Image: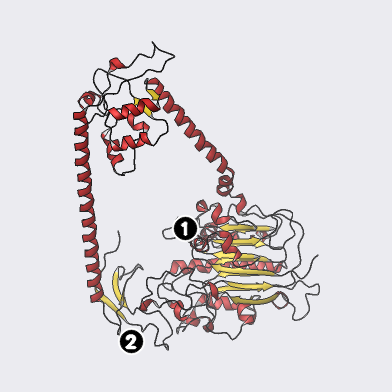
Amino acid sequence: MKKNNKMKIVTYNVNGLRSRISQFGSLHKLLNSFDADIICFQETKLRRQELTADMAVAEGYESFFSCTRTSDKGRTGYSGVATFCRVKSAFSSNEVALPIAAEEGCTGLVGNSQNGKGEVCEAAEGLEGEFAKDELLKVDSEGRCVITDHGHFVLFNLYGPRAECDDTERIQFKLTFFKILQKRWEALLRKGKRIIVVGDLNIAPTVMDRCEAGPDFEKNEFRRWFRSMLVESGGSFSDVFRTKHPDRTEAYTCWPQNTGAEIFNYGTRIDHILCAGSCLHQQHDLQGHDFMTCHVSECDILTQYRRWKPGNTLRWKGGRSIKLEGSDHAPVFTRLLEIPDISEHSTPSLSARYIPMIHGVQQTLVSVLTKRQLAVQIKSCEMSSSLSNENITIEICNEGVKKSLDNCSISDECSRGFADDAACNTLITPGSECSKSMPSHETKKKARKSQWSQLSLKSFFQRSPNPSNRADDSNTDFLISQADVPQAGNHSNETPVVDVQCSSSQQCALNSSASTQDQYELNSCTFEKEKTNAALLEWQRIQQVMQNSMPLCKGHNEQCVARVVKKQGPNFGRRFYVCARAEGPASNPEANCGYFKWAGSKSLPKR
């Protein structure tokens, strides 16, 4: 077996996978930017039915998704995790990056989880004895976990739930989520498996990992649970970043978006990489030998992915309109050493390559184009059949049409259409006892909307919506005498020639009608433009009034910004004013001064 293989693992809360793909141009470019063997995304914000090839499949990578399945209000299209593994081959490979087994969720109950050759799902046995089945299914319904077994270690890609201090339901959900995970980890460790946990756990372990921690910081039960899992507290896991950088301060991975806290690096460290288990050396029971010590070479935060870049204009100094691209989190990476190859295996069936929506789309691209071409051909045949059934005669003649055009005044749109063709087409409809109108009013109206437009062939053969009024149509372009149209049955092998007669009075009426219509459209366009300008001026006036009514903050004597309470409660929908500057340490005079003032009235909540 080959030794000394290096591996790079990245974890990144993307805050919407669509947005990050759009930012980088493609999924492949996003993945390649990390130059990593395994890339774990959280908060993809994708439902399973929304997965498409451009978001789930990239050349050279195998991907494994867990998407939200819940229909609870505010939870649809939320959360979601995905693990991308860079491999040379998805089949008959001995690469460690390609998992031998994969599982969606952490309970082992999700229908499309696949055990493959690994023992991942076996560790879920016994959970139903401690948790109700509905409780377990609910935990996995939000798409918060993907587990991949890489032979030498089992990788957990997690997105931990967020729970406000007064939200008892979400607090209980979060407790259950981490309690189930702890049971899984303990079962795997008893089997001698090594574990790597990555992701946004929504927990800042120590005061060092949180900007200006409050007085109740240490009382948080999730924080206490996290620390109880660490080696320092008698647990099995190592906090890889803190082990490598025990004294580094202001090393944050997440910043609030709405306060601009990233400007002053006023954030928290809630994105983690943990590891547990023995080393891969044969004498792994030697003192001081464990996975962390022997195989983890480095770990750090990829700050270059932060939204705020040095040199950006401060938002309270004219930079408010500048769009900051990126997630509100920064990626974290670790590098492993001396990871041997594993036995030959193929990608597990949980791989995105086997998702029907993706597999189906890739297989039917050619058929879609073929069907479209066939539909065009069928439509063309139907039109030809229709023209034949109505005895429509088309005479193609360069000299004859030219002579007809010289003797007949035709509208600009129509004459342009004929003149552009190398071979001119004189279009004739079947005669009747009274003269018929060729193009309809609606067709003419659409044709005049552009000076370069011309009437289509189809428009000449449209029937008037009211047959009884055809003879009375005052906008008739052509007068066709039925007597001049030879019967098809009398000359089956000859192309009948028809005389086209033009009426000067009717042409004048047409020109007058066109002029009136053009004037009406011009007046209508002018009115709409004036109306739009008036609305814009009124909106600018309202904005100016609102701007002038803004109070000044006490710390900087600058105009505040207005906010609205969006959280459900007694103050829901109420407006308030705060300092416009970005949130930062209280010791920094350039940061938000903390000014707050309620507005005089409530904003009506949306219904």
Three-letter residue code for mark 1: Gly
In percent of width and height, residue 185 lies at 64, 68
For image coordinates 22% across by 64% down, the residue present is 537
* Residue 126 position within the rendered picture, expressed as x and y whole percent measured from the top left: 63, 61
Q: Is residue 399 above or below residue 112?
A: above
Q: Is residue 273 above or below residue 85?
A: below
Give the residue type that dot 2 points to. Answer: Gly
Report the residue at 38% width, 28% height from top.
425
Circles 1 and 2: CB atoms closer than 8 Å? no
Of residues 522 and 151, the one nearer the viewer is 522
Q: Nearer the viewer, residue 397 or 376?
A: 397
Which numbered tag is attached to residue 555?
Answer: 2
| Relative vertical location of residue 432 with respect to residue 349 in this rendering, above or below | above
Q: Residue 427: percent from the left, percent from the top?
A: 35, 26
Per the image, the residue denoted by label 1 is 77
Quadrant of the image occupied by residue 592: bottom left
Residue 280 in percent (x, y) is at 76, 71
Picture quarter with the N terminus: bottom right
Q: Which mark is residue 166?
A: none
Lateral position of residue 607 relative to residue 68, left or right: left
Label 2: few (<14), some (14–19) or many (≥20) C-alpha neighbours in 10 Å? some
Pick whichever of labels 1 and 2 is earlier in the sequence.
Answer: 1
Foreground label between 1 and 2: 2
Q: Which secondary structure lies at badge 1? A: loop
